[in-house]
């Protein structure tokens, strides 16, 4: 297959550890998961992940996230705080319908690049239709094993995704690995709040509700510095910087 790469995807692939020799971007995004070997990271097979990965789930999530980001301050991505340089590279892990990725692209400017990574094909299809552009690219990939070389991005964000990742510590370590020195990360997750401890992990749904200090401690353990947390009810933002 010979495929002409959109400019943003071409620039994204230039950041890969091992660029694919014959990438298929016929659906507007690059799929790095199809045909993956048995050595791939563990997958979430729970109910909530299955819903979000479906066509109707992607539609519901798109509308719900748009509402939450407009009317609920806890859902607003701290774009200004991330301090994305003009011409920089920003990474959105679990990009869903792509609206946050597009905002990162606007912050990075026309010479910058925003890359959205998601596991759901319906989500990626919606994101490509609505937000793909000269400096916004989308990949189907796994947060636990990012394709990028060390220290290749200037900002990382992730909105309500880590609770669905089977090994969140691996995902956070990957976020640190690809972030350049001195650059910033902001991640939002649901927290347990007043929920009884046995309900923090709901096996049938595959969703993990983080303890109050759990993600902040994990950030520090993998090597982030200046870690700060801010909680709004059962929603928590964790911010940090790579030394």
Image: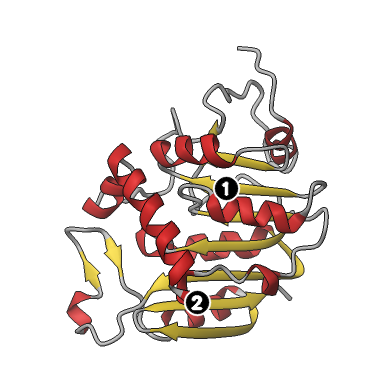
Q: Is residue 44 above or below residue 77?
A: above
Q: Position of residue 30 (x, y in %)?
A: 57, 32
In the rendered structure, the answer to whether residue 85 lies left or right of residue 226 reads right
Q: Is residue 68 above or below residue 141?
A: below
Instruction: Name the residue located 52 percent from the left edge and 69 percent from the top edge.
Output: 76
Q: Position of residue 66 (x, y in %)?
A: 44, 57
Q: Is residue 170 visible?
A: yes
Q: Which residue is denoted by mark 2 in the rendering?
A: 237
Q: Which residue is denoted by mark 1 in the rendering?
A: 116
Instruction: Name the residue located 44 percent from the left edge and 42 percent from the top edge.
Output: 40
Nearer-the-camera pick, 75 or 160: 75
Q: Position of residue 97 (x, y in %)?
A: 47, 47
Nearest to N terminus: mark 2 or mark 1? 1
Q: Secondary structure at mark 1?
A: strand
Distance between the Cα atoms at labels 2 and 1?
19 Å
In which quadrant of the rendered view does residue 154 lie? bottom right
Q: Secondary structure at mark 2?
A: strand
In the rendered structure, the answer to whether residue 23 lies left or right of residue 165 reads right
């Amino acid at each position: 297959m010979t495929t002409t790469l959109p400019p943003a995807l071409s620039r994204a692939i230039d950041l890969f550890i091992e660029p694919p020799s014959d990438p298929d971007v016929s659906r507007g995004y690059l799929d790095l998961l199809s045909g993956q070997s048995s050595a791939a990271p563990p997958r979430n097979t729970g109910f909530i992940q299955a819903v979000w990965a479906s066509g109707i789930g992607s539609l519901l999530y798109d509308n719900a996230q748009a509402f939450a980001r407009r009317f609920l301050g806890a859902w607003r991505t701290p774009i200004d705080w991330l301090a994305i340089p003009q011409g920089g590279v920003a990474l959105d892990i679990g990009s869903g319908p792509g609206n946050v990725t597009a905002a990162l692209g606007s912050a990075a400017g026309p010479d910058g690049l925003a890359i959205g990574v998601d596991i759901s094909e319906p989500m990626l299809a919606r994101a490509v239709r609505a937000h793909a552009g000269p400096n916004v690219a989308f990949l189907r990939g796994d947060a636990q094993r990012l394709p990028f070389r060390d220290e290749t991005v200037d900002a990382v964000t992730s909105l309500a995704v880590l609770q669905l990742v089977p090994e969140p510590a691996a995902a956070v370590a990957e976020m640190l690995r690809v972030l350049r020195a001195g650059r910033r990360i902001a991640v939002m997750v649901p927290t347990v709040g007043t929920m009884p401890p046995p309900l923090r992990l709901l096996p049938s749904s595959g969703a993990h509700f983080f303890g109050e200090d759990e993600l902040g401690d994990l950030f520090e353990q993998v090597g982030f510095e200046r870690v700060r947390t801010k909680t709004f009810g059962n929603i928590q933002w964790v911010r940090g910087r790579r030394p």
